[in-house]
Amino acid sequence: MHRPYYEELSEKERHVRELLGPLGIRVSPIAGSPVSIGWRHKVQLPFAFRVESKRQIATLGCFARESHQVVDQMECHIQDPALTRLGMAVRDWANRERIPVYDERSGEGFLRHVLMRKAHGTGEILLGLVTNGPRPTHYRALLKTLLKATAKALPGEDGTLVGVVQNINERSTNVVLGEQEQSWWGRDWIKEKLGKHTYHIELSTFFQINPYQTPRLYDEVRKGIREGSRVLDAYCGLGTIGMWVADRCSEVLGLEENPRSVQAGRAAAKANGVTNMHFVRADASERLAGLVREGWDCLIVDPPRKGLEEAGADAIESSGIPRLVYVSCDPRSLARDIERLSKSYRTLSAVPVDMFPRTTHVETVATLERIV
Ligand SMILES: C[S@@+](CC[C@H](N)C(=O)[O-])C[C@H]1O[C@@H](n2cnc3c(N)ncnc32)[C@H](O)[C@@H]1O
């Protein structure tokens, strides 16, 4: 963070070039984020504790590098400031109420994580408490003091808390969220606006976390899609990319494994009047093989960091799909997958887009065309 942002951008661009250049791909200049601090709209922090005079003091923050040692957070420049204040208020509340913190060694204790999401377009904030165990019987008393603390932390116009949700995770695992949720207060979703569309975002549904740069990323995908195409949007989340490009397409089919995302995506398409986008709930790597034979013109993939599964890559390789737009949050897995597909696809363009300023991560949009 001590370096100028332009230096960071050139380093990221160079990194993508080093990975894609040897494959004969020309990498375009990186698109920097219009906002390089305070952009993160989803914050997920683990609780830990230290012991002082035989009393447990809750701490909350990121893990120190390559450890599970929590660095108690006082400030974080990349987070939305309202979420930073809210996180600290929740930690102070936990200490005042003496709520035991989960200890991963013994499996004892209650509070595991705080998860906060803010909708940039509306200012709505959702607070999630991930716990080892169900809702406590005296939760109403706890809620009263929690709401008092959060109201102090969010006094201005830069955020309004609309719901408190408890997520129960009793497993001994590094996976943050459990399957079950219980509401403490308000809604279990926030309303977000992106371009001309609105979405309901829940604790567990994916949504891009840098709202200042998301339109830039999606416009890059849009450039790769020909007018009138039938488009498959795989790993689609709430279908935000599909809906961004739907007015250029004759039809869009979203493919997503999280049932809550599919449900919210269908509701969003309906509410936004996007009548030519539909959704299928499925594992993309399993389902692609069947779908790619149905005469689609373009496939968008936006997989998690690990990239395409072998089955998914094989299905694309043997498909007749003329165009592929690959949105990647890890240039290493992107390079591996492009190389894997190189007998059947030629890369037309690769544009790095900085979605994560002041971190080492970089997003890339690659557009590929079928050669055989
Ligand atoms: C990087 S996000 C992209 C979401 C969306 N394109 C966007 O821009 O908001 C990846 C999405 O893929 C979903 N996902 C992960 N593995 C999957 C799989 N095997 N099949 C289908 N969807 C998957 C995740 O639930 C998540 O919604």
Image (cartoon, helix red, strand yellow):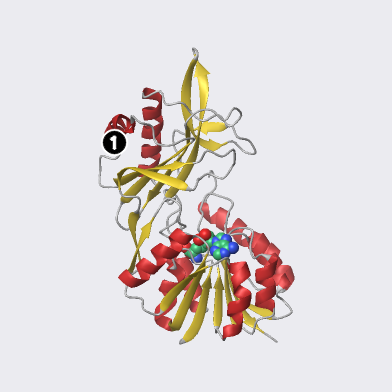
Q: Disc 1 on helix, strand or loop?
A: helix
- Residue labelled with disc 1: 147
Q: Nearer the viewer, residue 98 or 21?
A: 98
At label 1, counting other C-alpha atoms closer than 10 Å, the crowd grade (few under 14, some 14-19, many 20 or more) is some
Q: Nearer the viewer, residue 290 or 62?
A: 290
The location of residue 177, given as percent across then percent down, is 50, 46
The location of residue 36, given as percent across then percent down, is 46, 52
Identify which residue is drawn at 53% across, 63% down: 257
The location of residue 253, given as percent across then percent down, is 48, 76
Q: Please determine whether, in this image, residue 202 is positioned above or below residue 334.
A: above
Q: Is residue 363 visible?
A: no
Residue at mark 1: C-beta within 8 A of ligand 1 = no
Identify which residue is drawn at 70% across, 69% down: 21
Q: Please determine whether, in this image, residue 258 is positioned above or below residue 72.
A: below
Identify which residue is drawn at 49% across, 40% down: 45
Dividing the picture into quarters, in which one does residue 352 lie?
Answer: bottom right
| Left or right: 152 as drawn, with respect to 347 | left
Dividing the picture into quarters, in which one does residue 171 lie?
Answer: top right
Dividing the picture into quarters, in which one does residue 315 lie?
Answer: bottom right
